[in-house]
Amino acid sequence: MKRSLLSLFTLLILMGMILSACGPSAAPTEAPAVATEAPVETAPTEAPAAATEAPVPVEETITIGFTSSLTGAQEVSSKRQVAGFNLWMNQVNEAGGIKLSDGTVVKFAAQTYDDESSKERVQELYTRLITEDNADFLISPYSSGLAAAASIIAEQNGKIMITAGAAEDDAYKTGNTSLFQLYTPGSQYLLSTVDMLKTLDPEAKIAIVHENDKFSTSVMDGLKPYLESQGFETVLDEGYATETTDFGPVINKIVESGATVLLGGGHYPDGSTFARQLYERKVGLKFISLLVAPADSKFPELGDAALGVSTSSQWELAATHTPEEASAAGKTWYGPTGEDFAAAYNTATGEKPTYHVAGGYMTGLILQKAIEDADSVDPEKVRAALEALDIFTFYGGIKFDTSADAHGLQIGHQMVVAQWQKDDTGALVRKVIWPQDVANAAPLYPIPAP
Amino acid sequence: MQQINLLLTSLPDGILLGFVYGLAAMGLTLIWGVMNVINLSHGPIIALGMFGTFFLFTKAGLNPYVGLIPIAVFGLLLGVLIYTVAVHRVINAPHLSSLLATFSVNMIIIGLGTAALTTSPYNVDFAAGSFKVGSTTLLGTRLIAALITMLFTGGLYLFLYRTRPGKYIRAVANNRAAAELMGVPSTRILALSFGLGTMLAAVSGALIATFFPFSILAGGSYELKSFVIGVLGGLGNPVGALFGGLVLGILEGIIPAFLETSWVPVIEFGLFVVILLVRPSGLFGAKQ
């Protein structure tokens, strides 16, 4: 009796795990959170192509479909990505939409659902976005794992999907032709950090400790051969489960390994926990670089545990790209300046933008540029325009690989290294420390002992 | 040699953490022991305890350990409420009914919690220092949590064995019908037992919040650990739960010395299945 009851409750626990993780069922969130914020006055881009002799302007509303993680592990970064996208959409619509040469005025509407940070939900909801909501273009959910799940559905249905918050490389190396990656690929994520370490401390002993997920693993797979090629010794290479909360044992391993530098992390929840426990245990590492978490504006909530922690960032306002940079590189500048973007976001939300916000905004801006270049919303023409894109924006260079081996992979964008330091008032601020030509502070190396 | 060092440095951490796991599991196993109900709302109640610490510390400025008192009272009252509303009517029904009833409470708390608090991670920025013992760093928060767990365990023991309501609880656990014939108010005692179980869950959550970040979904993993501990120590045996917690904490401390950290849950839940198969009454025996 007891044994059968125990079997029964084991079964129910498993059901409970699944349902608990799912949380409440997702209702369509047609009115995006930030869409209701105060409209932004700034026009987003250069004047869209003016209609010349179009007799009767016809307004066409394009539906952009995506899911966001309103709940679950990816919530923090996903919400920021959506906030950035909504800012772009509001700006374009407020500015009167995109005017095509045939007189059509293109405006945008978003169709979105809460994916609960679940791959299964993502696949179900992207199918729904395509087949029931008739989305014209897709934006990926946040995180490599969820984007990979969505990309299968997009590719099966031949829908163009701009991926943001999804740096992992593999999805672009399987013959896909509908995906266009915004982020610098994961395999190159930490290369700038290694370059910096090479100048700071070529004798550093490296511990690699990362979340065992698609994105972080892809970053580390790119990092390891580069570390070796630069002559660094890796003394520890360890993965941890996504839901890890106690980093005590792995921190003990770092100490035992004799490492002086830690490169690792994964996403916000684990990264912030890891940083806090490293500080509490007075590990005394000279340098700590974690993925994603330190790039979020919530990170300084850790207090002194945040000091010195660095991250590879897709974009930083302090090192935002400029039209002068574009001219020097011989590229076409497109869109607002970083300062205008940040001011608009601040007006809309009262917050400073992170790179996740910039990423969300850029998904829309890229699509806008492709529609303008194609002078059409026809998916095939837009696809061709995306493939031909080679521009410079406040976010940096944007260019997609068009080879059959890695179609859609981002090849125009570079990362920067940012670090939490204290300003003159003692407040924690994120400074850009690498590359040197855009840095606004010297690296804090070694990190002051706790 | 390096692994031996690692073992020695990780072991104290595992033991300290094991105490808190044991406290969480004690709540679950007490409820099972007294009324044969598996409380599937255990995890969200742990999470509520975590948020209790967060709000009392960050909003009211209350020391987290002083905050345990209102959290314990809240946990007790919440348990009595859950018992009265959701469990009492199905206490004599087939076990599936009480499982589903507590599972529904679980979903209600998670749903309300997600709406009110989102699933973003929260963090209690509180530190109680750290102590270096040889090459081992002991965190003050974990040390205090282990001491408080011992206090609660001792208090629970005294309550169950030295007070009249405690003796009533044991009587109802042993034979409810006989206890009722002897004049024991079984309904009130069952409600009290459920309240004590949820109180222990809430207090364990409040202690965990002093060293780990959390969200409204965070209780789920501790609920699962509680099941493993409950089975390990013997379901219905609160003292066994404490030892089960220690065993689990030690495993979490020593496994990473030999294997990748990601093997910890595999081994933990593998152990759960093995114990269920070969010794379903647990290492320390189920309730008699």
Image (cartoon, coloured by chain):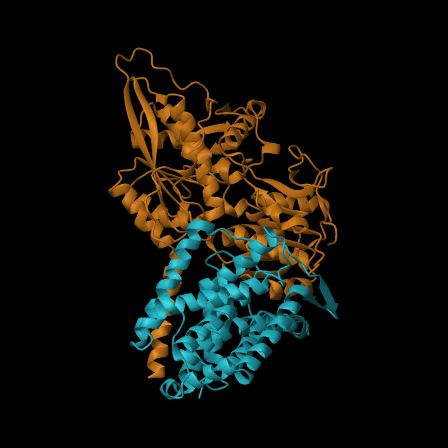
Picture coordinates of residue A146 (x, y %)?
Answer: 40, 50
In the image, is B18 to the left or to the right of A76?
right
**Quadrant (top left/top right/bottom left/bottom right) for the C terminus of chain B:** bottom left
The one of A402 and B159 positioned closer to us in this rendering = B159
The one of B104 and B123 positioned closer to us in this rendering = B104
Q: Is residue A349 above or below residue A201?
A: above
Q: Is residue A57 among the parts visible in the rendering? A: yes
Picture coordinates of residue A391 (x, y %)?
Answer: 48, 28
Q: Is residue B67 above or below residue A85?
A: below
Q: Which chain is cyan?
A: B
Q: Colour of chain A?
A: orange
**Quadrant (top left/top right/bottom left/bottom right) for the N terminus of chain B:** bottom right
The one of B7 and A6 positioned closer to us in this rendering = A6
Q: Is residue B271 among the parts visible in the rendering? A: no
Q: Is residue B189 above or below residue A161?
A: below
| Outermost front residue | B183
Picture coordinates of residue B103 (x, y %)?
Answer: 36, 66
**Rendered residue at 51%/78% (across/down):** B241
